[in-house]
């Protein structure tokens, strides 16, 4: 298997959890629009060749129309593959928030959370993120018209200082690509790394997630949701109204 069909305009082309690509890779989605193909996140970069093969095997010349890479944040399992994809697909435009762009271009290992992830064994000891150029910095609430799809970027601090949720309104529904900000069941991923802050997370939940109404929730890890995605955001807000931190999954791990 080299991809999973989620919607008429959306595929999963990479992800370690389901064995599509290297175990370290987050879910990597591919969205087809009339204005070009979009990848959401890039995986860890340890073995991006399988991801590239999967993209090239999709029907409809989608690989040849690849135009954008939307990056939810710069943790290694999402951003390590950016430089490989940019080499493979010249002209690919990498888009993320101003903060995450700075991190990918010149963040230190500490700022990227690499030091702690290596120590914890989340990433291999020799794992690194190759710093590379981000072509466009998207602002909070900025809209991008892509044919019949409209993408709005929401900057949602909490998991990292500049995490982005990509909110897509298109012919097959409203999709929220939430990265590691919010998962199925309203779970979050607060880390003991620079930039991960529960107070910022709480503000994100109350002021941003509360206003979104996606049909589908497509997170960076765990199961996706294709109906009433907004209910999972409401569950997240419910957890943030309590006094303790919301429940968290631990998705990124080697299983053997
Ligand atoms: Zn992350």
Image (cartoon, rainbow, N blue to C red):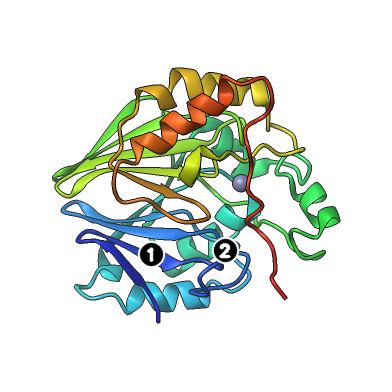
Q: Residue at coordinates 35% horizontally, 70% vertically from top-left?
A: 4
Q: Residue at coordinates 47% horizontally, 54% vertically from top-left?
A: 41
Image spot of residue 5 (x, y percent): 29, 67
Q: Is residue 137 visible?
A: no
Q: Quadrant of the C terminus?
A: bottom right
Q: Quadrant of the N terminus?
A: bottom left
Secondary structure under tag 2 reads: loop
Image spot of residue 174 (x, y percent): 25, 41
Q: Residues within 10 Å of mark 2 (few under 14, many from 20)?
A: many
Please say if 206 is above or below 137: above
Q: Report whether the residue tagged 1 is closer than 8 Å to ligand 1.
A: no
Horizontal side, residue 197 vs residue 5: left or right: right
Specify the quadrant of the image occupied by residue 55.
bottom left
Q: Residues within 10 Å of mark 1 (few under 14, many from 20)?
A: many
Image spot of residue 111 (x, y percent): 73, 39
The one nearer the camera, 228 or 125, is 228
Q: Residue at coordinates 69% horizontally, 25% vertically from top-left?
A: 244
Q: Is residue 216 visible?
A: yes
Q: Residue at coordinates 35% horizontally, 25% vertically from top-left?
A: 141
Mark 2 / mark 1, whichever is N-terminal:
1
Horizontal side, residue 65 vs residue 41: left or right: left
The one nearer the camera, 155 or 218, is 218
Q: CA distance from mark 2 to mark 1?
A: 12 Å
Q: Which residue is mark 1?
A: 12
**Mark carried by residue 91:** none
Q: Which residue is mark 2?
A: 25
């Amino acid at each position: 298997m080299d991809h999973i069909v989620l919607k008429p305009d959306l595929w999963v082309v990479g992800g370690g959890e389901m064995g599509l690509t290297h175990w370290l890779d987050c879910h990597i989605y591919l969205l087809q629009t009339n204005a070009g193909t979009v990848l959401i996140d890039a995986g860890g970069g340890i073995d991006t060749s399988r991801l590239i093969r999967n993209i090239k095997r999709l029907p409809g010349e989608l690989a040849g129309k690849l135009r954008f890479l939307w990056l939810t944040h710069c943790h290694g399992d999402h951003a390590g593959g950016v430089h490989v994809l940019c080499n493979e697909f010249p002209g690919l435009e990498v888009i993320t928030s101003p903060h995450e762009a700075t991190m990918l271009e010149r963040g230190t290992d500490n700022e990227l959370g690499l030091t702690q992830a290596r120590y914890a064994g989340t990433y291999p000891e020799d794992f690194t993120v190759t710093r590379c150029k981000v072509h466009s910095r998207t602002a909070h609430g900025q809209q991008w018209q892509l044919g019949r799809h409209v993408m709005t970027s929401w900057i949602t601090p909490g998991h990292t200082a500049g995490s982005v949720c990509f909110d897509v309104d298109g012919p097959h529904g409203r999709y929220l690509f939430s990265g590691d900000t919010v998962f199925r069941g309203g779970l979050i991923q607060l880390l003991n790394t620079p930039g991960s802050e529960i107070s910022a997370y709480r503000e994100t939940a109350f002021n941003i997630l509360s206003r979104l109404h996606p049909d589908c929730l497509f997170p960076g890890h765990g199961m996706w949701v294709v109906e009433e995605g907004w209910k999972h955001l409401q569950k997240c807000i419910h957890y943030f109204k309590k006094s303790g931190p919301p429940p968290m999954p631990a998705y990124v791990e080697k299983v053997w």
